[in-house]
Image (cartoon, coloured by chain):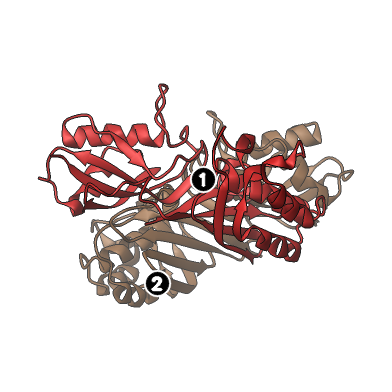
Chain colours: A brown, B red
Amino acid sequence: MPYRLKLLVAYDGAPFSGWQSQPGGNTIQDHLEKAFARVAGEPVRLHGAGRTDAGVHALAQTAHADIPSRSLGAARWPAALNASLPPAIRVLRCRYVAQSFHARFSAKGKVYRYRVWNAAVLPPFEVSRAWHVTGHLDFEVISGAAQAFCGRHDFASFAANRGKPGENTVRTIQAVRIRRHGPLLTLEFSGDGFLYKMVRLMVGTLVRCGLGRMSPEEISARLHSGAQTGRAARFAAPADGLFLVRVRY
Amino acid sequence: MPYRLKLLVAYDGAPFSGWQSQPGGNTIQDHLEKAFARVAGEPVRLHGAGRTDAGVHALAQTAHADIPSRSLGAARWPAALNASLPPAIRVLRCRYVAQSFHARFSAKGKVYRYRVWNAAVLPPFEVSRAWHVTGHLDFEVISGAAQAFCGRHDFASFAANRGKPGENTVRTIQAVRIRRHGPLLTLEFSGDGFLYKMVRLMVGTLVRCGLGRMSPEEISARLHSGAQTGRAARFAAPADGLFLVRVRY
C-alpha cells in the first residue's frame, strides 16, 4: 500500500501556466510531479486542494501524493523536492497522513487575499503581484459594500459563466476583511468554497463600487437574484493580485 | 540654454545589467535614455547619483538630465517616461532644478538597505530580493558587531580591490540599523558615501560574524589597518538583497 504525503506549497504564479497539469507543461502541478518522480524514482500523481489560474499566487496551497515508500522522513521531503524545483515554487512542509485525507475533498474552506495598488505609479516590486488601479478608490464604500458577501448566498452571478451546468452555486463566506496600508488595499475572503473566478469577480465589483461606477446595493441585488441575474455587465479583477493564503481542513 | 530635470527612479534590478550604460544595452540608464529620447525628440544624457551593479535594486535612485524645452510640466514627466519604460523601472517624481544641481556631485549621502532571509526555505516572493542564508544567524552578535562601522574610518578593506589606485577610501557611516522581523533580517546603512561593493562587503562580514565564523573584533582590526589589511579573506554578500533606499542632498 502506498503512503500518503500532504504538502504545503508556495508559488509565485507569474512565470507559470496555472496549477493544473496540461500538455504544454510549465504548470505548478507539472513541475511538482516531475520533482516527485525524480525523488521517488517512479511517476507520482499529485492532487491539489484546488486549481489556481495562470498568474495566481499561493502562500500555502495544499496537495497530497501517494508515494511507494516511506524511506524518506517527512521532514526531509521539502528539501529533496525543492532541489529540483524552480525557485518560484517552494515546498514548505510535508507530513504523512492517513489514506482518508484528500487535499480537495477533505478541505473545509479556503482563504484568499487580493492586493490592489491604488496610486498613480505601480512600484517595480509590485509588478504581477497587485492590481494597479489609478482612479481614486473610496475605502469606506468598499469596506461597507464587501459585507454584503458575508453569509450563505447563491453566488451564481459571481461565477465564471454563472457556474457550470447543474453546479450548486450556493457558498458561505465566513468573513471579508478589508485593510488599507498607504496605497495598498488588501481584501481577504474566508469561505467554505469558491466558484471559478469568484474572488476576482467579487473584487472587480467592489473596485467598481469604490470608483463610484456601481452602487453597493447592486451587490445584494445580484446575490438575491442568483442565476437569474441576466446579462448585467460583470468585472473580473486580473489574476496578478490574487493569492491563495491557505486551505482549512 | 537647456533645462535641468531631477528624477527619482525605482527599479527591480533583477532583469537588468546594472545602472550604467553599456554597449549591450539593457541597463537602467539605457532604458531611461531611450525613454527620454522618445519624449524629448532628441538624444538626452542621464547622470545618476551613483552606479548600481547588476541585480541591485533601487527604491529611489536620483538622476538628472538636461532637456531642450520646458514645454512639459514637471508633474507630467513621470507618466510620459513610464509609458515607454519596462514595468520594472518606474520614474516616481520629476522636478526642474537649477543648473548648479548635479545628481552625483551634489549628493551629501546615501542610504542602503540589505535584506537577508534566514530560514531553511526562501519563499518564492523573496527570490532575487534577499540573500538566502540557511545557517543560524545570531542577531545579537550582528547588531553588536555592526556598530563598529559607525563613524569615520578608512574603509579600504571593505572596498572592491581595496579601492581604486589613488582613491581616498575614508568614509563616514552615520548610522547602521539592524532589524529582525521573523526570518527577515534588514541591515540599513546611512553614510556620506560608499566605496565600490562596500555595503556588500560589510554585510558579508557581518553575516560571517552572525554564523560564528568570524570574531566581531576582526571588523575593528580591519577598519584600523585600512589599506594595509593584507590578504585576509573577504566575503561579499550577493547583489540580490541590496537596495539603494535614497540619496540625500
Instruction: State whether residue B12 is above or below residue A35.
Output: below
Q: Report if residue B124 is visible in the image.
A: no
Secondary structure beneath disc 2? helix
Q: Earlier in the sequence, mark 1 or mark 2?
A: 1
Q: Which residue is mark 1?
A: A13
Does residue B180 appear left or right of residue B91 in this picture? right
- The x and y percentages for residue B70 are 12, 45
Instruction: State whether residue B23 is above or below residue B136.
Output: above
Q: Nearer the viewer, residue B197 or B207?
A: B197
Residue in view at x 27 percent, y 68 percent: A210
Amino acid type, mark 1: Gly
Q: Nearer the viewer, residue A149 or B72?
A: B72
Q: Which residue is mark 2?
A: A149
Residue in view at x 39 percent, y 76 percent: A147
- The x and y percentages for residue B12 are 45, 44
Q: Report if residue A228 is visible in the image.
A: yes
